Image (cartoon, rainbow, N blue to C red):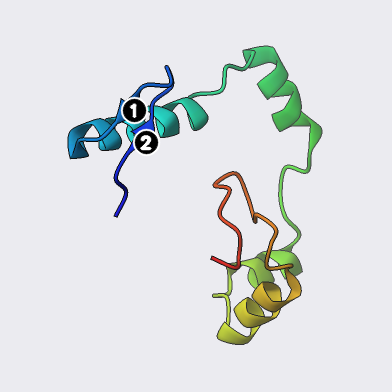
Amino acid sequence: MIANVLDENGSPQETIRGILRTFVDYLKHKYGLIQIEENCMNQMINAGLRTVAEPWRDLLDRPITLEELKTVVHRRAGNKAPGNDGIGLAF
């Protein structure tokens, strides 16, 4: 159980409500909206392929198999974070 955390101002939070609020505030800040310019977004959309070739479409629509999932997980280093969540595969 977490007994206390420091909020963004460095103040200790010891109540359940304070601890939860600190985590929520942190995650809102970390995963907040990303401001983009509309013309940049349109350039990115128009720069790539507009459709996927038929053979690839069928392949990409298939469900992921358990064997494929195991292969991907085992190829990753256990101490590396797989994405923005910061949670490593060792967890």
Query: Mark 2, residues whose alpha carbon is within 10 Å: few (<14), some, or many (≥20)?
Result: some
Residue in view at x 56 percent, y 23 percent: 34
Amino acid on which disc 1 is placed? Pro
Residue in view at x 43 percent, y 21 percent: 10
Residue 53, position as x, y percentages in the image: 76, 59
88 or 50: which is nearer to us? 88
Q: Residue furthest bottom?
A: 67
Residue 1, position as x, y percentages in the image: 29, 55
| Position above or below: 38 against 76 | above
Amino acid on which disc 2 is placed? Val
Find residue 39 and name its label: none
| Position above or below: 32 against 84 | above
Q: Is residue 24 left or right of residue 57?
A: left
* Secondary structure of the residue carrying numbered label 1: strand
Q: Is residue 40 left or right of residue 5?
A: right
Residue 36, position as x, y percentages in the image: 62, 17
Quarter of the image where one finds residue 48: top right
Residue to which mark 2 is pinned? 5
Residue 78, position as x, y percentages in the image: 68, 68
49 or 44: which is nearer to us? 44
Query: Mark 1, residues whose alpha carbon is within 10 Å: few (<14), some, or many (≥20)?
Result: some
82 or 34: which is nearer to us? 82
Q: Is residue 3 left or right of residue 6?
A: left
